[in-house]
Image (cartoon, rainbow, N blue to C red):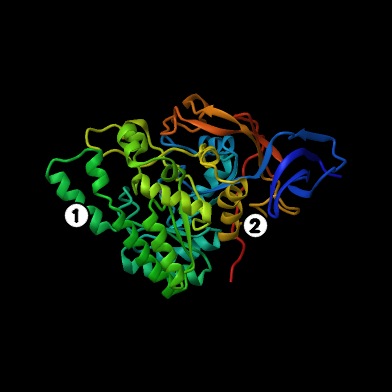
Amino acid sequence: MPDLIIRGGTVVAPNGILEADIAIEGEHIVAVGPGLSGAAKQVDATGLTVFPGLIDVHVHFNEPGRTDWEGARTGSSALAAGGGTMFIDMPLNSTPCTVDAASFDAKRMALEKSSITDFALWGGIVPGNLPALAEMAARGAMGFKAFLCDSGLPEFPQADDDTLHDGMREAARLHLPVLVHAENEDTTKSIAQRLLQAGQTDIRAFLASRPIAAEAEAITRAGRMAAETGCRLHIVHISSGSGVASALEARAAGAAISLETCPHYLFFTREDMLRIGAAAKCAPPLRSAHERDALRKAIHNGDLDIVGSDHSPCAPPLKDSTSFFEIWGGIAGIQSTLPVLLTLGVSPERIAALTASNPAARFRIPRKGSLATGCHADLSLIDLNTMTELRPAALLQKHRLSPYAGYEFRGSVRATFRRGELICSDGRITSETPGKFVRPEKGS
Ligand SMILES: [Zn+2]
């Protein structure tokens, strides 16, 4: 006998869209189909679309250590309000960064106390921490992130080619993926130095210092190493059509590569960045309308595999400086992924792939990512027939700074269920039990 039936919704199921009920017993889906019976508790989903719970593979919740920037309580609340049921936290900007067994344990413990959604952790690859990768893998790391440019944090140094190569070989041995922030440091640094010496510190100078060529080159280099080492490679936050093309070339040459972009690269252009300013600063930066449109095309045709928010807030004073180079780079958009994709006209099936089933398959997340019998009952109920202006007051993140404020978006998240429990209802957190730590399934 199921505990709960979600009745009469339009279900975005693995085999297509169907009008169906979903029966839930404990934490799991036990049936999907029309006219299900039983269950004391029923939720009427008539007129709503049922999506698999969004898995945000790219967030920076900064806990422990920098919870004045964001924390897992506020960050995961915002995620749940946006239809999310699980996140994977980046190894920075917590203190300490997640680069060894002790920091991994400390973060897991902190997040088990504070997270509302389920979560997993990325470890980091930095010069000198090669022996720690196996320790983090044993503890359940999803994979390892490396920066091919300056990360902005001295305690998380850039991976030189040697470090990256060794890290990929070790990750391949551990059957785990490597994630890279792909921008060529030599290029970005030398242009930035020249501009700063000439006294140019504004938004245009910042944009000029991070050309698309720097992204494309770093993707190509990482792709070659991945093909050679046999490591699964994931390119985070691809910002340009050229970046997509470089990654697809690497795949054609034998690299097991997956491609991620973020809602802000799909929604905004560099002209928007000139207008919005600090709230829209990120690296790689926002690009031209031509590049944005190439990314939109890659979303629709399936070249891009995953959309992650790269939610990366900071304390408000760090967004304020006379030099745009000094302002903290990071967009806080965790609650807006589904609204952005819906507003851009991406189909529900494609959205489910980009935000749930592809992340689960790519990173071997067990029992998540699809509305199928046997999976966790992670799901959201969305009203696709509303248009709502994003107001900062509706954001559950720690600091309500968002480049999306004032824009109108299609769709509103009415309810989010995590392992069968209603954790968010109309933007209000209702969860009574904490999120759980998730390890990847063993690979071979
Ligand atoms: Zn990031």
Type of residue at label 1?
Answer: Ser
Type of residue at label 2?
Answer: Pro
The quadrant of the image that shows the C terminus is bottom right
In the image, 263 versus 345, the foreground residue is 345
Above-or-below relation of 415 to 112: above
Q: Is residue 120 left or right of residue 244?
A: right
Q: Residue at x 68, y 54 (%)?
A: 14
First-in-chain label (2 vs 1): 1
In percent of width and height, residue 291 lies at 37, 50
In percent of width and height, residue 174 lies at 52, 69
Q: Visible in this render: residue 64?
A: no
Query: How much space separates mark 2 and mark 1, taking CA atoms?
Result: 44 Å
Specify whether tag 2 is near ligand 1 (CB below 8 Å): no
Image depth: mark 2 or mark 1 in front: 1
Question: Dot 2: few (<14), some (14–19), or many (≥20) neighbours within 10 Å?
Answer: some
Label 1 SS: helix
Q: Visible in this render: residue 385?
A: yes
Give the labeled residue for mark 1. 190
Q: Residue at x 63, y 52 (%)?
A: 369
In percent of width and height, residue 148 lies at 33, 59
Q: Residue at x 41, y 31 (%)?
A: 401
Q: Which of the labelled discs sits on residue 366, or is there none? A: 2
Specify whether tag 1 is near ligand 1 (CB below 8 Å): no
Label 2 SS: loop
Question: Dot 1: few (<14), some (14–19), or many (≥20) neighbours within 10 Å?
Answer: few
In the image, 434 versus 9, the foreground residue is 9
